[in-house]
Image (cartoon, rainbow, N blue to C red):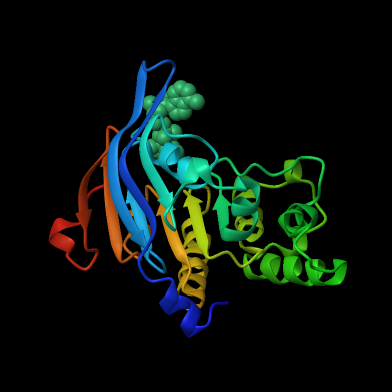
Amino acid sequence: MKSDTEAASQSGPIYEAKGLKKEFDDGRVAALRGIDLRVNAGDFVSIVGPSGCGKTTFLNMLGSLDFPSSGQLLFKGTHIPDLPDPADYRARDIGFIFQSFHLLPTFTVEENVQIPMIGQGKSRSERKERALFLLEAVGLSHRRDHLPSKLSGGERQRAAIARSLVNDPDVLLADEPTGNLDSKTAVHITELLCQLQAEHRMTMILVTHDLGVARHAARIIRIKDGQIIAENDPADTASTPQA
Ligand SMILES: Nc1ncnc2c1ncn2[C@@H]1O[C@H](COP(=O)(O)OP(=O)(O)OP(=O)(O)O)[C@@H](O)[C@H]1O
Ligand SMILES: [Mg+2]
């Protein structure tokens, strides 16, 4: 958890995209066509837009999981492809909730949740305690000894959410974190993420199709065809976009 002094010293953009473009298949697919966006430390931003508009592509580049074709994408002033230790950035600075979970199939739920803590200086008992605390928080402690293949889609998603939070990241990048959950569980998980974001002053960038989820954010960014077409204040219902 950050102190007030730390939080104050982090004011200013934590992420800045300038003319960010991403092409696939030798330029045949233009997934991002010039994204300009500033996100300050502690911001809670939702990203909405139709299927295929580039949301996951953008999040993957914020998470240093893919490279831009052109333009700049800065994390605390450093172009993300030039980060000195991308693995360390992914392990320590950010938590990432993948749209398709990416749980390791031969490890149990509890082991999956513990994996990002390995090599982070925590003892075995600390790792176990932290994993069980988060599995409890997402309502999955009764499934801790199961393999991912034995879980429902929503249970896998909750395991992935617990895993993303184990190292208490400054930044959470969440790709459809409630996409596979029933409405009651989706509300519970959204409230949990909002609570963690507020308490830890976490920067949270949340991709969602669900406007009910998106409206929890202070900013809603709407993407279409690889470009930002609007930014809305969720309190201004007249201008709130349709996902
Ligand atoms: N590895 C890839 N190779 C080729 N094209 C890709 C690749 N990844 C994504 N695309 C294309 O880039 C575009 C953006 O995809 P992306 O996954 O970012 O969309 P999305 O907004 O996350 O959609 P959804 O809401 O369905 O998850 C799509 O046209 C997709 O087909
Ligand atoms: Mg996607």
Q: Quadrant of residue 94?
A: bottom right
Identity of the residue drawn at 41% across and 69% down: 42
Is residue 180 visible to us here?
yes
Ligand 1's quadrant is top left
Q: Is residue 173 left or right of residue 237?
A: right
Looking at the picture, tell me which residue is in the foreground, 134 or 14.
14
As drawn, 221 above or below 227: below
As drawn, 143 above or below 100: below
Could you say where residue 187 lies in the image, as x and y percent from the top left?
A: 46, 64
Could you say where residue 33 lies in the image, as x and y percent from the top left?
A: 29, 32
Could you say where residue 111 lies in the image, as x and y percent from the top left?
A: 80, 54
Could you say where residue 57 lies in the image, as x and y percent from the top left?
A: 43, 36
Q: Is residue 105 left or right of residue 197?
A: right
Identity of the residue drawn at 49% across and 78% down: 6
Q: Quadrant of residue 14?
A: bottom left
Going by the picture, which residue comes out furthest to the left?
238
As drawn, 225 above or below 91: above
Q: How many marks?
A: 0
Q: Quadrant of residue 119?
A: bottom right
Looking at the picture, tell me which residue is in the foreground, 34 or 59.
34
Going by the picture, which residue comes out furthest to the bottom?
4
Going by the picture, which residue comes out furthest to the right?
124
As drawn, 171 above or below 19: below
Quadrant of the snapshot with the N terminus: bottom right
Identity of the residue drawn at 73% across and 70% down: 130
Is residue 49 visible to us here?
no
Q: Is residue 188 left or right of residue 120?
A: left
Identity of the residue drawn at 21% across and 68% down: 235
